[in-house]
Image (tube, grey):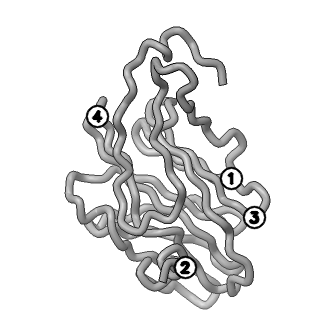
Amino acid sequence: MKTTKSMARRLTASAAIIGIGFGVTATTTAASSVPGADVQTAVISPLVSQSVANYEGKWAVQGGTLVESFQENGEVVSTGSTSLRTGLPADQIISFGYVAGFGSAATGQNYAQLSGQAGEDVTAVRVISASGTVTETTLADGIWGAVWLAGSNPGEYSAATLEFDTPAGTRTVSTIDVDVIAADQR
């Protein structure tokens, strides 16, 4: 990515990734006037993407890894990756962590995000946040992702409830029970 003169003049933004059990490797480096500073890049060809207001999440599969990027007003604010899991039963889902998010110093807006995998029989996944916000995820080829506007309650960035549909009906689980990142850490 080419660093433009205007990008080089911007001050480094301090962006907070908020999350308990956030299951990806994340960085929050913004363009800087420091020579050689890391400039994050957006996922170019997302498998799934979702946006709300001026915030967009993009997820893509690269080999056995799910890569993600999040942008506010077209500027990348965070990126990350996590290993995909194999052998997921057809009627099950997993999440990659609990709800995480981004608080924008520039706009004062808070955003939340969550992603995971779904078995081949899963036809829809909804995230129900701690505050009760229901977000229909974008689901494709066994990957799901969601972004939504978050309030100022820090409890929003914790465990969520996941509701998902299969031919057998709708099921509800907590991210506490299907968070593979926390399970790996135990």
The residues tagged by marks 4 and 3 sit, at their Cα atoms, a distance apart of 34 Å
Crowd around label 2: few <14 · some 14–19 · many ≥20 (10 Å) = few
Q: Give how far across and how far down residue 172 sits, in percent.
A: 45, 84
Query: Furthest-left residue in view?
Result: 153
Tell me the SS state at disc 3.
loop
Q: Amino acid at mark 3?
A: Gly
**Which of the two discs, 3 and 2, sits closer to the camera?**
2
- Sequence-wise, the earlier of marks 3 and 2 is 3
Left or right of residue 152: residue 5: right
Q: Nearer the viewer, residue 178 or 19?
A: 19
**Which of the two discs, 2 and 4, sits closer to the camera?**
2
Can you identify the residue that label 3 sits on?
Answer: 64
Q: In the rendered structure, are the residues bearing label 4 and label 3 in contact, judged by CB atoms less than 8 Å apart?
A: no
Can you identify the residue that label 2 sits on?
Answer: 184
Q: Amino acid at mark 4?
A: Ala
Tell me the SS state at disc 2.
helix
**Which of the two discs, 2 and 1, sits closer to the camera?**
2
- Sequence-wise, the earlier of marks 4 and 3 is 3
